[in-house]
Image (cartoon, rainbow, N blue to C red):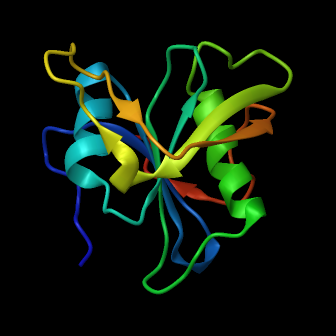
Amino acid sequence: MKVGLAEDVRAWEYVLPGGWKILAGKTDEDNEALSLRIARANDYWFHVHGVPGSHVILQAPDGEEPDKTMLKVAASVAAHHSKARNAGVVPVSCTLAQHVSKPRGAKVGTVEIRKETTLKVRPGLPTAFTSSGSI
């Protein structure tokens, strides 16, 4: 089942060839909504390690799994929408959305993750995409 964005969630949206979609939150509230309400269990979740930035969700077409290249594209978007935008190579945490949760009593936009891997990428946006800019 595909879940659309709620009207109160603002995010950058990148639609890639083959039906892949990348969503990046604009505020702490949007990040929390993307991570905890919008993301499906098998979507991939990204965030730059140790630096403020957008929570990024990679949504696959039904029945498909991302390859390493697609994961790195989404990680590059996370790096671009962070305070590390002008850095060289940036470490980005990646996990399935089902491994993202909110700690009890944590401030808005704060999550904890399990079973993460780290991808090292350069910040950037996909070269072939259509973007609605914001939702």
The answer to whether one can see residue 124 in this image is yes
Report x, y in % for residue 132.
Answer: 43, 50
Could you tell me which residue is drawn at 31 percent across and 55 percent down? 39
For the C terminus, give its image quadrant. top left
Report x, y in % for residue 3.
Answer: 22, 66
Residue 32 figure quarter: top left
Q: Residue furthest right?
A: 88
The answer to whether one can see residue 135 in this image is no
Q: Residue furthest bottom?
A: 63
For the N terminus, give its image quadrant. bottom left
Could you tell me which residue is drawn at 69 percent across and 20 percent down? 85
As rendered, which of 120 and 104 lies closer to the eye?
104
Left or right placement of residue 54 versus residue 34 in this view: right
Residue 101 figure quarter: top left
Report x, y in % for residue 35.
Answer: 32, 42
As rendered, which of 79 and 91 lies closer to the eye?
91
Residue 113 figure quarter: top left
As rendered, which of 14 and 119 lies closer to the eye?
119
Left or right placement of residue 33 versus residue 21 in this view: left
Report x, y in % for residue 16.
Answer: 59, 65
